[in-house]
Amino acid sequence: MNPARRLLLANKSWAQERRAIDPEFFARLASGQQPEFLWISCSDSRVPETQLTVTDAGELFVHRNVANLVRADDRNVLCVLQYAIEALKVRHVIVCGHYGCGGVKAAINGAPPGRLSEWLDPVAQIYEQHRAQLDLLSEEERWAKLVELNTVAQVHRLAQTDVIENAWAKYNYPYLHAWVYSLPDGLIQPLLTLSPSGPQKLL
């Protein structure tokens, strides 16, 4: 069967099943959204946010890119952030990295020149900042640690955006979370939570 056709057939089956369980499901979704979370993560196909958080349609507002970056020159992520905070009033912004991230590994090894290398430059800079400590670790440990450092760095970048600064001053929200997802066991590890009053205790 054509792979694209398989997806369309799966969609029909899913829609029929949802209507059978809850006849008003799609009517509620069509009436609007009120997600509590903005989820920023890697584009990796192995990180399905609704599955690993057991959330349904309408619960997560989502932005994904290679290596889950928050860049000041990326209008896409900044527009998503602004809409999520100002229009949808989300109360939590989660940056979720993942162990085994190919983008982070490319930043360590040196991505080929071009768009990907330029995109990953912030990760490469984090690696250089911590290189003395990271290079004492094994290859796998170095990779995992840089995933964590990168994820935490993106949360600090969020805190420096005008959208978050304004929201903290006006509304005293959102909370910003740095999480890392483990592919081998399917578990999420919380690393850091920032609020208007500063860092919060980990879960």
Image (cartoon, helix red, strand yellow):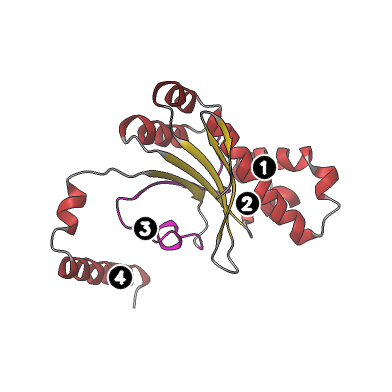
Q: Which residue is mark 2?
A: 103
Q: Which residue is mark 4?
A: 5
Badge nearest the viewer, 3 or 4: 3
How far across and down, in percent of the image, does residue 137 sit?
Answer: 82, 55
- The mark found on residue 123 in the picture is 1
Badge nearest the viewer, 2 or 3: 3
Q: CA distance from mark 3 to mark 4?
A: 26 Å
Counting residues from the start of the chain, the first of labels 3 and 1 encountered is 3
Counting residues from the start of the chain, the first of labels 2 and 3 encountered is 3
Which image quarter holds the N terminus? Answer: bottom left
The answer to which quarter of the image holds residue 130 is: top right
Q: CA distance from mark 1 to mark 4?
A: 38 Å
Question: Callout 1: 10 Å neighbours few (<14), some, many (20+)?
Answer: many
Observer-nearest of 153 and 111: 153
Residue 47 higher or lower than 38, as above or below: below
Q: Which residue is mark 3?
A: 55
Q: Is residue 192 left or right of residue 78?
A: right
User: What SS does tag 2 mark?
Assistant: helix
User: Which residue lies at the image location 29% right of the left edge and 71% below the top edge?
Assistant: 10
User: Which residue lies at the image location 16% right of the left edge and 70% below the top edge?
Assistant: 20
Badge nearest the viewer, 4 or 2: 2
User: Are the residues tagged 1 and 4 within 8 Å (C-beta)?
Assistant: no
Residue 43 higher or lower than 4, as above or below: above
The answer to which quarter of the image holds residue 91 is: top left
User: Are the residues tagged 2 and 1 within 8 Å (C-beta)?
Assistant: yes
Bounds of the magenta segment: 46-73
Counting residues from the start of the chain, the first of labels 1 and 4 encountered is 4
Q: Amino acid at mark 3?
A: Thr
